[in-house]
Amino acid sequence: MKRVYLDNAAATPVRREVLEAMLPYFTERFGNPSAVYDLGAEIKEVLEEQRTKVAHLIGAQTEELVFTSSGAEANNLAVKGAALANIKKGRHLVVSAIEHHSVLNAARFLEKFHDFEVTFLPVNRYGQVEPERLKRSLTPATVMVSIQHGSNEIGTIQPIAELAAICRAAGILFHTDAVATVGSVSVEVKELGVDLLTLSGPVLGAPKGTGALYFRRKLRLVPQIHGGIQENGRRGGTENVPGIVGLGKAAELAREELAHLVPHLTRLRHLLVAGITEGISNLIYTGHQVERLPGHASFCFEGIEGEALIFLLNRQGIYANTGSACASKALKVSPVLCAIGIRPDLAQGSIVFTLNRDNREEDVHYLLEHLPPAVEKLRSFSPLWRKKMAATAGG
Amino acid sequence: MYSQTVMDHFNNPKNAGVIEDADGIGEVGNPVCGDMMTFYIKVKGDRLVDVKFQTFGCVAAIAVSDIVSEMAKGKKLKEAKKISKQTVTEALGGLPPNKMHCSNLGAEALALAIQNYQEKSPDTHSARVAKIN
C-alpha cells in the first residue's frame, strides 16, 4: 500500500548520510571523550567538531552549545537551569500559554518546589504573544521569559526578535523553544536576540535521543543532570557520541539545504491548504496564515472528531496528527486550541499535517483524494453535523 | 491499541444512520466532553426491530455504538436493557483503559431510547393511568 507520511513534526526517519556518519562511533570509535589517551582524546575532538556544526546552523559560537538527550531536556535545562542560577534576582517567570509541556511543567515545578511565581501569557487568536501584553507582565522580580519560536500544533511563528528585545531592555533572560523552526526556517540567535534556544535532533533527520541548548556566552546554568564535568559542567553523564555525531551531520545538511527546503515546503503547503479549503466545507485553518512554519497545515473540521479521522486516513496509508481530546492520553482537548479560542467541539475535529523534504506533490494529491471522503463519511453519521445542517436548512 | 473487532465496527459501521419515524430516541454526551451519541429505535410488540445510531466521537465511540445497535436488534426490550458496559467491552474484544467510558455511553444511549419509547407509548401510558386511579 502507498504510504504518505505527514507527521514530520513527530519524528522523521534518520537520514542515510546521518546513519553512515554515526556507525563507526558505535564500534571502532567507541572511546570515552573524557579519557586522556588517543582513543578518547580524538573522540573529544570529534565532539567539538559537531558542536561547531550545530552552532553554525543557528549562528552561534562553538562554546555556546550544550548537548542534551532531547528538546525536552534542553527546555528543562533552560527554564530550571537559568531560573535557579538567578534566584537572587527574583522568583518570577513568564511563559506563554501554548508552550510545550517540557516548558510548562518545568515552570510548574519551580512554582511548586522553589516558590516561583509563574505568569502564563495568553495568546491572540492566531496564537501569537502580543508584545504589549508581555511588557505588562514583567516585574522587578522577573528572571526569565520563555516563548516558543514555532508551534507544532498550529504552525504559528512568534515575533521572537521583538519579544526578546523587550526582555533585553528590561535585563531579563529570554529563552525560546525552537524545536519546530530549526532546520525549517532560518534561525539565527543573534538576529533573534535570545539568550537561550532549544533545538531537537529527530525533526532534523538525526536519531531520537538528541538535542541541544544554545546559551549566550558565559550565561550561568544550574545543571539538571548532576555528574562529572562533561559539557563544561553543565550536564553530567558520558556524552551520547554516536547521537551527537548524527546531530552534527544532520545540522550540516540542514544548513546546506535550507535555501531549497523553504520554497519546497511552502509550495506543497499552499497546494495542500488550497485543496482542503476547496474540497471540504465548514473548517477553520488554525494558526497564523502567513507567519507560520512553511511545511505546516492545521485545521479543525466541524462535526467530526480527529482521532476517528486519523484512523480512517491510516487505512489509506496516510499518517497525520490531531489535538483532539480523544487522542490524548489525558482525554483533554489541546490547550493550544483552547488558548486561541477554538470552541471545544471544533477543537475535537483538529488535524495537523507536517511536511518535510521527502514529501512530493503526489503525496498532497493522494491526501486530497482521500481526505474529503473520510470527512464526509464521519459527518454522515455525526449527530452534531445533522443538527448543524438542519439549522442551516431551517435558517 | 484497538482490537480487530473494534476496527471492523469502526471501518464498516452497519447500523449508522437515522430512523426518521423512530419510536424512541436517546441522546447522551455533549460536544464539550468529546462524545455524543444518538440512538433511534423501532419497536414492534415488545421487540426492537431496528436500531440505528449517530455518533460524534472517536474510534471507540463509533465501534461501541455499532456493536450496541447490533446486540440490541431483535431483542426484547427487557433483554436489551440488560446490555451493559461489561457486555459491550467483552463483545468488542476489549477497549483501551482510557476509552472504557465510551462503552458506558452506548448502553446508556440505548437505555434512554427505550425509556423514551416506553414513556410515550400508549400501553405504558394507560398502565400508568390505571395505577394512578
Image: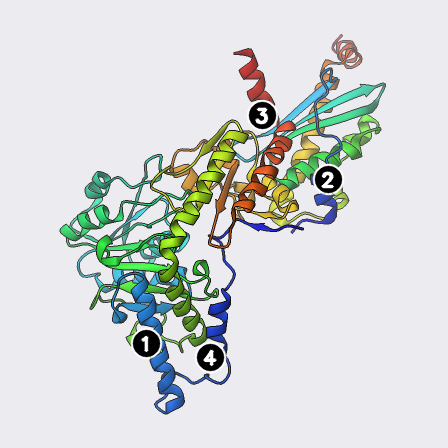
Other residues around mark 4 within 10 Å, as few (<14) / some (14–19) / many (≥20): some
The span from disc 1 to disc 3 (Cα, nearest Å) is 58 Å
Q: Residues within 10 Å of mark 3 (few under 14, many from 20)?
A: some
Residue type beneath disc 2: His
Which residue position holds label 1?
A48
In the rendered image, the vertical position of residue A152 relative to residue B16, given as above or below:
below
Please state which of the two labelled residues, at mark 1 or mark 2, is closer to the viewer. 1
Tell me if residue A152 can be seen.
no
Amino acid type, label 4? Tyr
Do the residues bearing badges 3 and 2 touch, measured as CB atoms within 8 Å?
no
Residue at 20 percent across and 41 percent down: it is A136
Residue pictured at 26% horizontal, 48% vertical = A160
State the residue in front, B79 or A247. Answer: A247
- Ranked by sequence position, the earlier of labels 4 and 1 is 4
Residue A336 on image: x %, y %: 41, 42
Q: Observer-nearest residue: B63 or A55?
A: A55
Nearer to us of marks 4 and 3 is 4
Q: CA distance from mark 3 to mark 2?
A: 21 Å
Can you tell which mark lies on residue A25? 4
Q: CA distance from mark 4 to mark 2?
A: 49 Å
Q: Chain of mark 4?
A: A
Q: Marks 4 and 1: same chain?
A: yes
Image spot of residue A255 (x, y percent): 35, 61
Asked if disc 1 and disc 2 are in contact, CB closer than 8 Å, the reply is no
The residue tagged 2 is B9
- Name the subunit of mark 2: B
Vertical relation: A69 (above or below) A110: below
Q: Are marks 1 and 3 on the same chain?
A: yes
Q: Is residue A350 left or right of residue A57?
A: right
| Residue hosting label 3 | A385
- CB under 8 Å between discs 4 and 2: no
Q: Secondary structure at mark 3?
A: helix
